[in-house]
Amino acid sequence: MRILSFLILLLTVQSCASKKDNKKQLLPEGIKSATEEIYVVVDNQKKLLQRKKMVFTKNGRIKYSKTVDSLENLLQETKKKLWFVLESYPDREPYYCKTRWKTKQRERISCYTKKQYKQNEVMYHYNKKGTIDKIVDNFAPFYTQHFYYANQERSKIIITDKDDKPIDVIIVNCIIKDEKGTCLKESRISTTTNNKEEILIVPKYH
């Protein structure tokens, strides 16, 4: 009976398995924490949009994160719990986000309020290496982000609507990498609007 219970538990844990956050974000094994800053670039002038601090578990999942704007006002805070991720916001009630592992390298991430009202849901599709293939938004505006890679780096993101019509193509370039392969400076340019963003990452390793 104990062996049977153990096997049931093992299968349950495996069915709930999820892809590592460091793999999703193209960060190496052994990442301890990272600070991500997103800037908008206009006429070669950078303006900070937001700063995100992430703390990782030893197996590469985000244990805690805090996102602030350019004035250090809190935008979002997340805490990893045993069966869900708690997302806190300054202007609305918290979300409880559950990840369910599906077949064919997919994850469904659904977020609820405390009253069990579903607020949003996305479906992550992965490549065999654990990188993101596409993200499908199951709530309005029902966009899908398709990710493309070259030389183990993200090179392009194509955004499509619910009818699979392209809305935007974002060209991604890694400008500076460290010795572990982390992209420290990345540029993203929209071919539709010509808007440019720059992402800076400062990692710390175990």
Image (cartoon, rainbow, N blue to C red):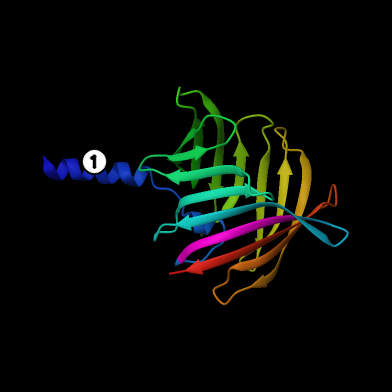
**Can residue 81 be seen from the camera position used here?**
yes
Q: Where is residue 146 shown, x and y percent of the image?
A: 66, 48
Q: Nearer the viewer, residue 2 or 105?
A: 2
- Give the magenta range: 31-39
Please state which amino acid type lies under the numbered disc 1. Ile
Q: How many marks?
A: 1
Q: Nearer the viewer, residue 68 or 138?
A: 68
Q: Where is residue 121 shown, x and y percent of the image?
A: 55, 33
Q: Where is residue 31 shown, x and y percent of the image?
A: 48, 65
Residue positioned 61% across, 66% down in the render: 152
Q: Residue 103 sits in which quadrant?
A: top left
Q: Residue 166 sits in which quadrant?
A: top right
Instruction: Give the answer, above or below, for where 53 lies relative to 175.
Output: above
Left/right placement of residue 167 relative to residue 58 reads: right
Residue carrying label 1: 8
Magenta-colored stretch includes residue 149: no
